[in-house]
Image (tube, grey):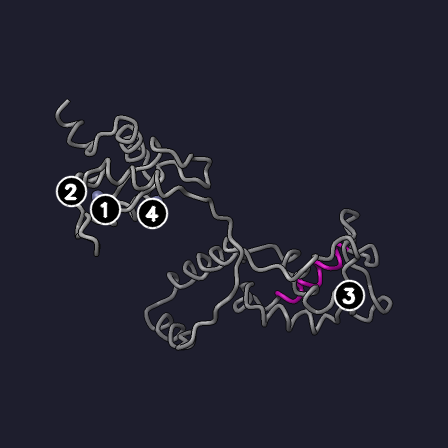
Amino acid sequence: MAQPRSWLEEVIDALHELGDQAHYNKIFQRIQDRGIMNFEENKTWTAAVRSTIERSSSDSKAFTGKEDIFYSAQGKGKGVWGIREPYRPRENRPMTKDVLDKKYRIDEHRAKALSDAQLKKKALSKETKHPKSRIASTNTYERNAFVSEYAKRRAKGVCQLCAKEAPFMDKAGSPYLETHHVVWLSKGGGDTIDNTVALCPNCHRKMHVLNRKEDREALLSAAKSGESHPHVRRLVT
Ligand SMILES: [Zn+2]
Ligand SMILES: [Zn+2]
């Protein structure tokens, strides 16, 4: 069963929220309340939690001999477990956006596998008028407004991928294009004028969904040469 994060990470965070020590029942309840893990269709998830703890505790026969993270707090067999001091998180860590995104992708995959009727039933049972908000930590890269504006002006209102004009004007009357880093910042790309292009919203989304090599190459050469329509240029030459 695919999970958005490891059981070990989830158990440590849940146990930390419980004051670094708690009975199995409390741990199970807390993990369920946190709503991160995928246990709905996995009746044995509590066994996964138990084995995660016991494999990482020298107080258990199941100890793997690797990291000794948990201790049996009230003697063996009582089911009360604590986190050893060096492994206690310093604060309640916000869930990372990566984990939440992964959780969404897992659910999306499950949703696609349902029949129409099953899906409708599930959607109705899951719909909510007041979606819960959650603070998530995310790694963001600072980007420079001057680089972005330069790339937009260089494109002169024409998408650098499909070579069509911007689909509409913004409130200030400028052609609406979005800037995109051809090599994503998260993959080591630079926030530089030769890695930044201006795209129409459709092409921008296409790059994020498909990110095809031939499109990347066309965009990089457009960014380097400063040409606004790589395809037109390729047709001409
Ligand atoms: Zn376009
Ligand atoms: Zn982008």
Residue 48 visible: no
Mark 1 residue's CB less than 8 Å from ligand 1: yes
Quadrant in the rendering for residue 115: bottom left
Tell which quarter ligand 1 is in. Answer: top left
Q: Secondary structure at mark 3?
A: strand
Residue that label 3 marks? 81
- The tag earlier along the polypeptide, 3 or 1, is 3
Please name whichever residue, 189 or 59, is drawn nearer the observer in this view of the structure. Answer: 189
Q: Residues within 10 Å of mark 3 (few under 14, many from 20)?
A: many
Residue 177 visible: yes
- The tag earlier along the polypeptide, 3 or 4, is 3
Which residue occupies 62% across, 66% down?
44
Mark 2 residue's CB less than 8 Å from ligand 1: yes
Residue type highlighted by circle 2: Lys
Residue 217, numbered circle:
none
Vertical placement of residue 24 versus 140, above or below: below
Distance from disc 3 to disc 1, alpha carbons, whole Å, reads 55 Å
Q: Answer left or right for 196 relative to 2.
A: left
Quadrant in the rendering for residue 88: bottom right
- The tag earlier along the polypeptide, 2 or 1, is 2
Residue 200, numbered circle:
1
Q: Residues within 10 Å of mark 1 (few under 14, many from 20)?
A: many
Q: Nearer the viewer, mark 2 or mark 3?
A: 2
Q: Nearer the viewer, mark 3 or mark 1?
A: 1
Residue that label 4 marks? 209
Residue that label 2 marks? 164
Bounds of the magenta segment: 45-56
